[in-house]
Image: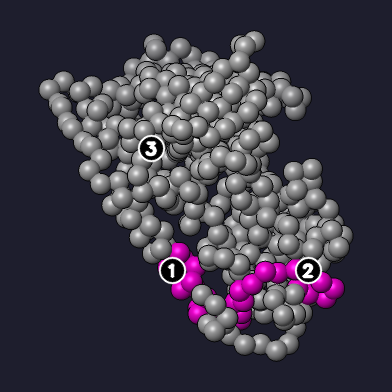
């Protein structure tokens, strides 16, 4: 995609959007549907992080290696055995690349001709008075939205600059699997990729400063840690990174741990310690746009930056780094830029998913966050061994935890660790959005032999012993 495919327009635009990923396209389409003349500026591969190097490629490879695990786990059913193996990892990666290319074309490049009032330009953008410079041309615009995304963050480990480390981008393109892999970072990216490579037959060690999924409920992080260890992943928490170096056999990381010093060796190392906003070439300092300590663009709840007329959305803001939240925030930014800042960003009922197995799915406040916010709370926690669906599937890995107001009974948070948790959390999202109480959830009819029925059972467990209930009883 380049300027030869762009629609020409000589006048001033109503809106210029910098960044052609999910947030940028969401903003541009939202504005175009309102009749605005939009300039959309992209740099690099169109489509941004999710479709190209994030959600789509990682989740298809995660699903691919799940088939290996399913075969190994088949004997949990009496009389059943199965076998699966990787016969051609390069073919698996090529298939992933074909999916990425197809979705990038269908969901991004092919959309542009459908909007006659969107002009696409390629090039590095810089904010200037009255608009945006792109290459040698200037685009005049009344309002600007910055949606330039983020890139892999690099921790300050002495020696890392001399090591050929992998990122979440390059790891997904490996044509040949390493024998061993050291994963630095235990957030959702580190957890997902550690399990993916382990299931593909790689010996994986995961090292982190605190614990697995540090922002999740402690029960969920601890339980998932046990499951990953059961699969053969070595997890080292509470580590202090000392140095890293290249060796004849790969890499060696020295950490401080349990009062001593430990050296961990592996063939390859994957850095998964977070994301850094893409702001460096935009001229933000000259434009008077405030940044946070992490380098993210500071925005208010209307998506406004500190410079009038300039908005920002998506990962470049450092806020809620999920593709659906990037698109949501960009819609608000576009509507506010054109129609007077009437809309407010609201993440109270934002679902969060970690695509490990079991999956981690959450919405709302953790117990600790609710108490810190001043809520008096009640908590209900049940294991998946109380859920008929899990018993029938002979896979009771996981738990469900609900957090509710002690007096109001309103649901404040829901947290699921379950093989099908990602497809169950939306019920809790809708319950929170509608202000339902735990009792109202418990009184709602749920389908039997589903994972989502666990939400009803967890709601009942606030006041009842669910082990003493018959099937479907409430």
Q: CA distance from mark 2 to mark 3?
A: 43 Å
Q: Which residue is mark 2?
A: 127
Q: Nearer the viewer, mark 1 or mark 3?
A: 3
Which sits in the foreground, 371 or 97?
A: 97
Which sits in the foreground, 4 or 471?
A: 4
**Percent position of residue 353, x then y:** 51, 39
Q: Residues within 10 Å of mark 2 (few under 14, many from 20)?
A: many
First reached walking from the N terminus: tag 1 or tag 3: 1
Q: Secondary structure at mark 2?
A: strand
Q: With respect to residue 90, does 10 lie above or below?
A: below
Q: Which residue is mark 3?
A: 178
Whether tag 2 and tag 3 are in contact, CB under 8 A, the answer is no
Q: Quadrant of residue 340?
A: bottom right
Whether tag 1 and tag 3 are in contact, CB under 8 A, the answer is no
What residue is drawn where x is 32% and y is 32%?
A: 201
What residue is drawn where x is 62% and y is 87%?
A: 8
**Percent position of residue 42, x then y:** 61, 69
Q: Secondary structure at mark 3?
A: loop
Q: Quadrant of residue 120?
A: bottom right
Q: With respect to residue 189, does 77 lie above or below?
A: above
Q: Quadrant of the C terminus?
A: top left
Q: CA distance from mark 1 to mark 2?
A: 29 Å
Q: Which residue is mark 1?
A: 105
Whether tag 1 and tag 2 are in contact, CB under 8 A, the answer is no
């Amino acid at each position: 995609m380049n300027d030869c495919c762009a629609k020409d327009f000589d006048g001033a635009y109503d809106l210029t959007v910098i960044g052609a990923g999910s947030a940028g396209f969401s903003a541009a389409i939202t504005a175009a549907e309102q009749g605005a003349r939009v300039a959309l500026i992209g740099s690099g591969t169109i489509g941004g992080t999710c479709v190209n190097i994030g959600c789509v490629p990682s989740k298809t490879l995660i699903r691919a290696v799940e088939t290996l695990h399913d075969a190994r786990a088949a004997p949990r059913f009496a009389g059943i055995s199965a076998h699966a193996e990787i016969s051609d990892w390069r073919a698996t990666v090529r298939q992933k690349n074909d999916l990425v290319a197809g979705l990038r074309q269908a969901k991004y490049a092919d959309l542009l001709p459908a909007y006659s009032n969107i002009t696409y330009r390629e090039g590095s953008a810089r904010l200037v008075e009255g608009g945006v410079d792109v290459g040698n041309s200037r685009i005049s615009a009344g309002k600007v939205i910055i949606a330039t995304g983020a890139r892999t963050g690099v921790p300050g480990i002495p020696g890392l600059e001399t090591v050929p480390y992998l990122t979440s981008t390059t790891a997904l393109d490996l044509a040949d699997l390493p024998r061993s892999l050291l994963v630095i970072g235990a957030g959702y990216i580190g957890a997902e990729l550690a399990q993916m490579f382990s299931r593909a037959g790689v010996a994986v060690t995961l090292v982190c400063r605190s614990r697995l999924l540090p922002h999740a409920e402690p029960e969920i992080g601890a339980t998932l840690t046990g499951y990953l260890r059961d699969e053969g992943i070595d997890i080292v928490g509470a580590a202090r990174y000392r140095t890293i170096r290249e060796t004849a056999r790969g890499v060696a990381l020295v950490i401080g741990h349990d009062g001593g010093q430990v050296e961990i060796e592996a063939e390859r190392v994957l850095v998964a310690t977070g994301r850094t906003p893409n702001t460096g070439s935009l001229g933000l300092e000259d434009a008077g746009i405030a940044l946070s300590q992490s380098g993210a663009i500071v925005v208010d709840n209307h998506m406004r930056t500190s410079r009038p007329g300039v908005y920002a959305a998506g990962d470049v803001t450092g806020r809620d780094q999920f593709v659906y939240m990037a698109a949501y925030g960009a819609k608000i930014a576009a509507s506010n830029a054109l129609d007077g800042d009437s809309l407010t960003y609201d993440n109270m009922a934002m679902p969060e998913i970690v695509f490990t197995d079991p999956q981690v799915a959450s919405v709302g406040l953790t117990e600790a966050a609710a108490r810190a916010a001043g809520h008096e709370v009640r908590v209900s926690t049940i294991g998946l061994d109380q859920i008929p669906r899990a018993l029938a599937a002979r896979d009771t890995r996981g738990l469900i935890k609900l957090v509710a107001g002690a007096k109001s009974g309103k649901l404040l948070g829901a947290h699921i660790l379950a093989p099908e948790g990602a497809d169950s959390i939306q019920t809790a999202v809708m319950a929170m959005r509608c202000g339902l109480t735990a009792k109202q959830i418990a009184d709602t009819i749920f389908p039997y032999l589903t994972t989502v029925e666990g939400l009803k059972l967890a709601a009942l467990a606030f006041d009842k012993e669910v082990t003493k209930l018959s099937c479907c009883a409430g």
